[in-house]
Image (cartoon, rainbow, N blue to C red):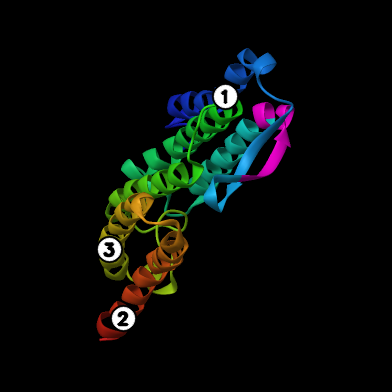
Amino acid sequence: MIRKHKKTLILTSLLTLLPIPVGLLLWNRLPEQITIHWGLNNTPDGWAGKQIVVFGMPALLLAVQWVGVLLTSLDPKVKNADGKPMKLVLWLIPAISLTLCGVIYGYALGLDFNMDNVALLLVGLLFLIIGNYLPKCKQSYTLGIKLPWTLKSEANWNATHRFGGKVWMLGGLLLTQCVFLPKNLLGVAILVIMPALVLIPLVYSFVYYNRQDKK
């Protein structure tokens, strides 16, 4: 599987590491301590040294990408993991690396970001993208909603992923709209939406198992 996607893997690895040369070009303009985490109300509450941000973050994300690709390639049902879902595995981390490092560099250089809204938009977009790909995921041990019932029954797997894809896309859309909520309701909305995105497909799959798979 790795051999089949070798060119794409090389390209996406280079893109994941692209923030390193960009950081070197900006090196003299970047502060020694760079904000890497924000709490509610757009308040910085986490910092890291310039070396860690410029070199460490892209390198860590590259390691995450390669671990994901290797685990997928070792999947005994790896043929089922090919196609569009595999493209998501290959391209998701480069997109995160470029976006995350770009936002961190921009904030360090004085750009005025509302990080609460940026985070909501990015997480919402991520759920929208993954939700779009979920119905295309064929049964495997590495990609998709891996539950005892979905792995046991292909019909359960397909039904859960069709339903879960709709739930995640709706949840992603709702998260992007949370940027318009007043601050006192924002935390409540997130605490409702995020667990629901996990629990609703799980409950659906379990109900499907009891109604269909046990017949």
Q: Is residue 123 above or below residue 92?
A: below
Residue 158 is tagged as 3
The reply to whether discs 2 and 3 touch (Cβ–Cβ < 8 Å) is no
3D distance between C-alphas at marks 2 and 3: 14 Å
Q: Is residue 100 above or below residue 206?
A: above
Q: Is residue 98 above or below residue 82?
A: above
Q: Which residue is mark 2?
A: 207
Which span is picked out in magenta?
Answer: 44-55
Find residue 4 and report its image quarter: top left
Query: What's under tag 2, amino acid-wise?
Result: Val
> Which percent across, then down, holds residue 34?
67, 32
Q: Earlier in the sequence, mark 3 or mark 1?
A: 1
Neighbor class of circle 3 (other Cα within 10 Å; few <14, some 14-19, many 20+) is some
Instruction: From the viewer's perspective, tell me whether residue 13 is left or right of residue 173.
Output: right
Q: Nearer the viewer, mark 2 or mark 3?
A: 2
Along the viewing direction, whichever of 104 and 186 lies nearer the viewer: 186
Q: Which residue is mark 1?
A: 19
Along the viewing direction, whichever of 163 and 47 lies nearer the viewer: 47
Q: Earlier in the sequence, mark 1 or mark 2?
A: 1
3D distance between C-alphas at marks 1 and 2: 45 Å
Mark count: 3
Q: Say whether residue 114 is magenta.
A: no
The reply to whether discs 1 and 2 touch (Cβ–Cβ < 8 Å) is no
Residue at 59% across, 24% down? 109
Query: What's under tag 1, amino acid-wise?
Result: Pro
Residue at 33% across, 73% down? 205
